[in-house]
Image: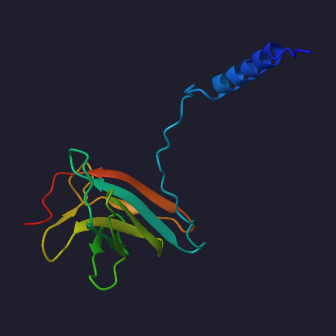
Amino acid sequence: MKKNYFGRISLLSFFCLILLAACSGIESPTATLTPTQTYAAPSADKTTVIGRVVNTSGQPYQNLTVRLAEVYYATDNPEQGAYVLDAAFSPGGVTDQNGYFIIPEINPMDYVLVLGSPDAAYKIIENEEGKAKVWHTEAGKILDIGEISLDFDFNP
């Protein structure tokens, strides 16, 4: 008695083709994820300042010192004031390889942003009027100053 293997081989071949088709290189689109920075919320009585510093070509300033000079207002005229950068005690940080910086857990008050070293080359961020720009911080919140683009040589 002769067995008919043709039917079994055909069925096995059919399943193999289906399996190969399922495993073939059907490309599905893959999303490209861009890493985002995440920051811990400051304590209820503190604030955090974040931002990025790049040159006018969009290249990040790496290892750049970022300091916050405290703003003090005149008691008789709150429109008048001065900022003070204390090299030992003013809050600050350093930009990473992508130009981002974070200055966490600082006292909420008004600050002026000073980039670079006051002993060498530095830049004070100015407002539209050419005066030092004052950044207001609030307790329990993160102040994102965004991206600062400037053309300045911090290595004189």
Write the residue at 24% across / 56% down. 126
Quarter residue 11 falls in: top right
Q: Which residue is found at the position 63% from the left and 29% from the top?
A: 23
**Residue 104 % position (x, y):** 46, 71
Residue 34 x, y percent position in the rendering: 46, 45
Q: Is residue 7 left or right of residue 117?
A: right
Q: Is 131 in front, or is 19?
A: 19
User: Is the C terminus in the top left, top right, bottom left or bottom right quadrant?
Assistant: bottom left
Q: How many numbered marks appear?
A: 0
Considering depth in this image, is 72 or 97 the residue closer to the camera? Answer: 97
User: Coloring scheme of the render?
Assistant: rainbow
Residue located farthest toward the right when viewing the structure as drawn: 1
Q: Quadrant of residue 4?
A: top right
The residue sitting at the bottom extreme is 88
Q: Is residue 28 left or right of residue 4?
A: left
Residue 79 falls in image quadrant: bottom left
Residue drawn where x is 30% and y is 64% of the image: 113
Tell me where residue 77 appears, x and y as whole percent.
Answer: 35, 68
Q: Quadrant of the N terminus?
A: top right
State the image coordinates of residue 13 (x, y, percent, origin top left): 72, 20
